[in-house]
Image (spheres, rainbow, N blue to C red):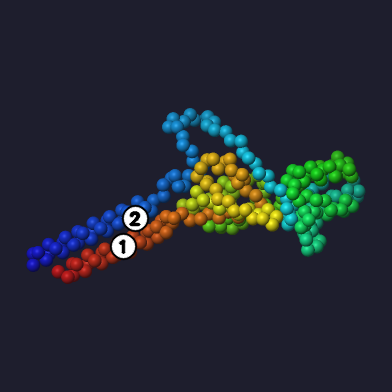
Amino acid sequence: MLFSIFEKKKMIKFYLRISCLVIILFGLFSCVPNRRIQFLQKAEATNLKLDTVIRTYDIALSEYRLQSDDQISVQFESLTPKEFDFLNGESTASISASGTSLQAGGKFIDQNGEIPFPFIGKVKLGGKTIFEAQEYLQQISDKYLDSPIVKVSLLNFRVTFLGEVLKEGTVTLNNSKVSLLEAIGWVGGLTDFGDRQKVKIIRTWGNKTQVQYVNLLDEDFINSPYYFVHPHDVIIVAPAKIRPIMKYSSQNLVLLATVANLLILVVNLSR
């Protein structure tokens, strides 16, 4: 009888130790170290001087070039009297490959890379950067208007975020020079489960689509041609391999504790 009670106590202690060990292991493996989360890491010296430039990068800017179905705003300002300014107000007209329509807010570049203007006819802007298109239209308007000023901006600068971001969806940016990190900020950042070492970028130009992976944990990403986003980019943040453990560890711990308590209860009742 004494032997039986002794064996039961040993069994209870054994189950308790196993349960504690498993809980500790779950806690250790479900932690995400800072090196898996912090953007743009670089091995630094231990004693860094504050308020001092540590490094300087010459950014390789890959400027976006206009393509078909882009929507741009074209505004002309000049000293030409309104009744003779045939280019004024053209930002309210639009054209696409399917035909002409009125649409407030901009012009659509057709499949030939062109947009139409009264009297001038179609002007090819496809393949040009925003500033090249602006300069080209400036040269044309100089022939017809008095002291003209041309402003061109891209209206459909949209970037789509999917996966482990706080807010999936498409954001419209009002600046043609936006870094990927800035764009991530627009969707609230990445979740703790997001794999920052392999972020997929899907970029479309004409009939071609490029797929590229970038490492946001490495500061050398600043030198990447993908440091700046392009219109129509799709950014996919995959989950880290540890995500299942991190996401469901609390449920697993509760289940483990329940099973351990049940085993202890069974042992006690079997005395």
Viewed as shown, does residue 97 lie left or right of 2? right
Q: Quadrant of the N terminus?
A: bottom left
The residue that label 2 is drawn on is: 26
Q: Residue at the location (52% across, 46% down)?
A: 216
Other residues around mark 1 within 10 Å, as few (<14) / some (14–19) / many (≥20): some
Q: Amino acid at mark 2?
A: Phe
Sooner in the amino-acid sequence: mark 2 or mark 1: 2
Inspect this view and state whether residue 113 appears.
yes
Q: Hey, which residue is sitting farthest left in the picture? A: 1
- In the image, 208 versus 246, the foreground residue is 208
Viewed as shown, does residue 198 lie left or right of 105? left
| Disc 2 to disc 1, C-alpha distance | 11 Å
Residue 29 placed where, x, y %?
36, 52
Q: Residue at the location (32% across, 54% down)?
A: 25
The residue that label 1 is drawn on is: 256
- In the image, 174 versus 4, the foreground residue is 4
Q: Hey, which residue is sitting farthest right in the picture? A: 84
SS at circle 2:
helix
CB atoms at circles 2 and 1 under 8 Å apart? yes
